[in-house]
Image (spheres, grey):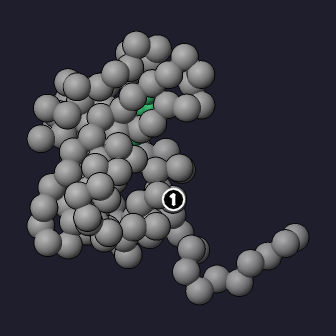
Amino acid sequence: MAIAAARKAYAPYSGFHVGAVVEDELGNLHDGCNLECASIGLSVCAERTAIGRGLSRGARRFVRVWIYTPTSKPTQPCGACREMLRRFSDNPEVVLLCDGRLIRRFRLRELLPNVKGEERRTS
Ligand code: THU
């Protein structure tokens, strides 16, 4: 499903076609692809497109995300997507898929540590 979503990517600037699927707590799956804009900062990653798709269907918590990139090794999600996933999940499984044989699995807390119960430090 993530690979099929990547085929729908609109990525004329990077040529990097990414697909993502998020699973909500009811087991429903929501897919997304990246979409780009000439103003590159406005581009949206596949993960956030998938989250938006889930949210617009009423989902609020996600338990797992699969991310496919057309690379020989898995690609880590960007910081913005980690933050957005954190907002709508507790500690979901993050599965990284690519064209190579390696599949990597993380929990979000491994990718975004020290987000809960930590005192903020200003220096
Ligand atoms: N991209 C994603 O959609 N997800 C990732 O995890 C990595 C990067 C997209 C954003 C941009 O459209 C293109 O890949 C190049 O960075």
Percent x, y of residue 52: 35, 51
Left or right? Give the position of 7 relative to 34. left
The answer to whether residue 62 of the structure is visible from this angle is yes
Type of amino acid under label 1: Glu
Q: Residue at x 59, y 86 (%)?
A: 117
Give the quarter of the image for residue 74: top left
Quadrant occupied by the C terminus: bottom right
Q: Residue at x 57, y 24 (%)?
A: 40
Foreground residue among 100 and 9:
9
Q: Is residue 3 above or below residue 49?
A: above
Can you tell me which quadrant of the image ligand 1 is in? top left
Give the quarter of the image for residue 17: top left
Percent x, y of residue 109: 44, 69
Q: Residue at x 74, y 78 (%)?
A: 120
Left or right? Give the position of 24 relative to 120. left
Foreground residue among 76 and 30:
30
Quadrant occupied by the N terminus: top left
Q: How many marks?
A: 1
Where is mark 1, residue-wise? 83
Foreground residue among 56 and 70:
56
Q: Residue at x 14, y 72 (%)?
A: 26
Disc 1, SS:
helix
Percent x, y of residue 56: 29, 55
Left or right? Give the position of 67 relative to 123. left
Foreground residue among 90 and 97:
90
Q: Is residue 85 above or below residue 99?
A: below
Neighbour class for label 1 at 10 Å: few (<14), some, many (≥20)? Answer: few
The answer to whether residue 66 of the structure is visible from this angle is no
Q: Residue furthest right?
A: 123
Percent x, y of residue 4: 14, 32
